[in-house]
Image (cartoon, rainbow, N blue to C red):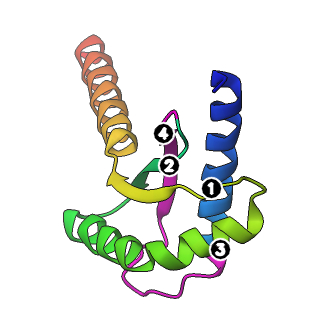
C-alpha cells in the first residue's frame, strides 16, 4: 500500500482517537492531561500503535494506560463508525515520554543560562 495513504490514515486515526477519548470515554483513570503523540500503522492496516503522553506522575501514566486498554474496544468501534476504511485496525496504546523529556531538557537549558548569567554578575 502506498506510504502516503498509510500516513494519511494514521493522521486521521490520531485525530479521531484523540476526539473519542476526550469526548466519549468516561473512564476517570484517563488523565485530563493526555495527548496522542503519533500513530504507527502496520502495512496491512490491521494494527495501530498509538503513542500517547501524559503530563503527571508515573502513576497517572499507568492509570491512563489501564483506562485506554479497557476502553480500546469502545474506541475501535467508534473509530469504525467515523472512518471510511474497509478494516478498522486493532489498537495498541503505548506510553511515550518524549514530551516529559523535552520539558526536562528545557528546564536544564534554562538552569544553565541562569547559572551563566549569575557568573557574569560576580
Q: Is residue 36 above or below residue 4?
A: below
- Which image quadrant for residue 55? bottom left
Residue with the mark numbered 1? 87
What SS does tag 1 mark? loop
Q: Is 34 one of the magenta-colored residues?
A: yes
- The answer to whether marks 1 and 2 mark residues whose Cβ atoms lie closer than 8 Å is yes
Quarter holding the C terminus is top left
Give the label on residue 74, or none: none
Crowding around mark 2 (Cα neighbors within 10 Å: few <14, some 14 to 19, many 20+) is few
Residue with the mark numbered 4? 40
What SS does tag 2 mark? loop
Which stretch did the figure color magenta?
21-43
Where's residue 52, x and y in %? 42, 53
Quarter holding the N terminus is top right
Q: CA distance from mark 1 to mark 2?
A: 7 Å
Point out the tag, 3 or 1, that comes first from the N-terminus.
3
Residue with the mark numbered 2? 46
What SS does tag 4 mark? strand
Point out the tag, 4 or 3, that comes first from the N-terminus.
4
| Residue most extreme to the top | 120
Q: Residue at x 65, y 66 (%)?
A: 79
Amino acid at each position: 500500500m502506498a506510504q502516503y495513504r498509510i500516513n494519511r490514515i494514521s493522521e486521521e486515526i490520531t485525530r479521531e482517537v484523540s476526539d473519542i477519548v476526550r469526548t466519549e470515554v468516561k473512564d476517570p483513570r484517563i488523565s485530563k492531561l493526555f495527548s496522542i503523540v503519533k500513530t504507527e500503522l502496520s502495512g496491512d492496516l490491521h494494527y495501530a500503535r498509538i503513542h500517547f503522553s501524559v503530563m503527571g506522575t508515573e502513576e497517572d501514566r499507568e492509570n491512563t494506560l489501564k483506562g485506554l486498554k479497557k476502553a480500546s474496544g469502545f474506541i475501535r468501534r467508534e473509530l469504525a463508525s467515523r472512518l471510511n476504511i474497509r478494516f478498522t485496525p486493532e489498537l495498541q496504546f503505548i506510553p511515550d515520554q518524549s514530551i516529559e523529556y523535552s520539558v526536562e531538557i528545557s528546564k536544564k537549558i534554562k538552569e544553565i543560562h541562569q547559572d551563566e548569567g549569575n557568573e557574569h554578575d560576580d
